[in-house]
Amino acid sequence: MRSKLIKTTPERRAQVIGDISQGSEPGIRFYILVGISTLIASIGLIADSTAVVIGAMLVAPLMTPIFGISLALVLGEAKLLRNSLLAVTAGIFIAVATALLLGSLPIALEVTPEMLSRTQPNLFDLLVAVLAGFAGAYALVDESLSPALPGVAIATALVPPLANTGLCIAVKAYEGGLGSFLLFVANFLSILIVASAVFIVAGMNYRFDSTNKKLFLRRFGLAAFGFLIIFALLTNSLIAMIEDRILSQDIKQVLDQELAGMYGAELNRFNSDFESGKLYVLAHVMSPELFVPKEVKQIQDALSKKLDKPVEFTIRNTIVKDMGATGSTPLVEMRNLEGFFEGRELTRKELVIRETEQLLWELTSEAPGTQLEHVDFGMLPIGPTVVATITGRPPFPEIIRAVQDDLRKRLEMPDLYLLVEVIEPDFWSSQGRLLLGWTRYGKLTPDKERAIKTIENAVREAFSRIDGLFPHDAYFDFGDGRQPVKILVAVSGGREPAKEDLAHVQDTVAKASPLPVEMYMLKTNEAMLTRDGYVPLAEKLRKNVRKRLEEVRKNWHMVN
């Protein structure tokens, strides 16, 4: 049986048979080339170099004896079949053993993407092998296409899977080694069957009767059966791969939706895995601030609802901030096919935060010792509110009012409010708060320790008879011992301390203290009486505002 599409002259037929028979001889040169190509492939896999792996495919001589098996089955040549089988079998053993030996050396072998890509073959790999087998056999019988054989050698990839098998065995990754060997078997059987079909169609054996079922089954039955098994296995692998991709798309869709309302948050990548009936998802997310557990649980619940299965979700949070000339900016770093940065419309929250940061950066950059730390936006009882946190000196109310008015005009939000949380620099040691020019206690002698306890008790007693003021801390300056001990008492309350208050405390402490004293008072924030005692009013207000903001962040969609 001959085809008009594949024409072979008697001379070309004889040349093909001679070339394949010679290339299928299991000689020393063949084994050396197999070993060299395996070393090249192994180095390329370890170094994660695609170019080196391609070079190994060009050197590898395994494709010729596979063609030899196909031609021997078509011609019924026992000697050619024996030589080709011996060459392929020995080549497989040499390739796996060479890679195993290299992988066993103390070279700190690490898994690379080139290695991983050959551990889980699927139906696409089988399809590539079928097409490559056809192209190789076609180019072999048609002398005008023979220059295409190097490209076919690259497409079939026979030695790299064997090299990967040896490397996987070396690191005891037996499942990965089995997958790599399965990839080789798929390529081997595909080339064998398709090449045999091409040789039959090309009329390489005029006497071969493809309609003789017994003869056909005897020669090709085993190979066809093996091909069907590989086809079934790789089809199942492809189905699993498709399911994984669908799952990944669903996970990414949920993560993108949930992160969209969190200012500056950007999904970098994620990993997922099933174990004991639960889906574990680890997302690598970049954002200008840390996620709180409530936000992570919100995303976890959304994933469970979307995927209809139990999910344990974890965020690996990387703190980043894109900074432009006028402040932070939510720049999207992805480029489209035309080479331009892809942008998106900012949410209401992102727009408010960006404009606020730009204004406050301009102000704080001109104020020595003052720095903008964080800006947040949410719906408080007074209305939509921006909360800006700065460290340093408190701004004047007229400055806050001017920024608030500017924001209202820029954002066209006449009901927008601006709150500024000020964190003043404060230093604390193991002995308490430190004030410039005052030591908390320093190195104390037993006499000074007794004096401090006596003075502190006297301070508490003195303030128990003063209305509207509450002592917090006492700071001591013992000096050189020749002058009175200076004592600074930090107080808070609903009124300012008076000279009479200081005189009363001075008299009470002087009567109880074994040392001469000189009293001072430092007025701090107002105090609030709670069940736990007196606390600074500003601290209580700050906690209330932060608690409300956390609730707003959990339900951010209310203001977007």
Image: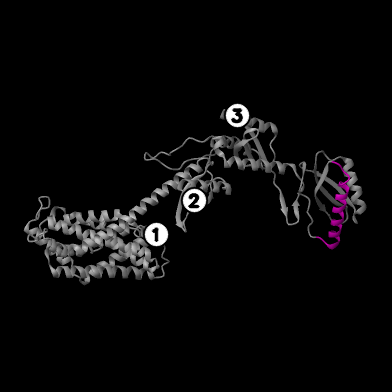
From this viewpoint, is residue 40 visible? no
Q: What element carries label 1?
A: loop
Q: Which of 478 and 233 is in front in this view?
A: 233
- Chain-order first, disc 1 or disc 2: 1
Query: Mark 3 belongs to which amino acid?
Result: Arg
- Chain-order first, disc 2 or disc 3: 2
Q: Main secondary structure of the magenta part?
A: helix
Q: Name the residue under label 1.
A: 112
Q: In this view, does 151 lie to the left or right of 207?
A: right
Q: Identify the disc placed on residue 408.
A: 3
Residue 24: image quadrant is bottom left
Residue 49 pos. (x, y %): 35, 58
Q: Mark 2 points at which residue?
A: 284
Q: In which quarter of the image is the C terminus?
A: top right
Q: Nearer the viewer, residue 158 or 179?
A: 179
- Chain-order first, disc 3 or disc 1: 1
Where are the magenta residues, as a range?
444-467
Query: Mark 1 belongs to which amino acid?
Result: Thr
Q: What element carries label 3?
A: helix
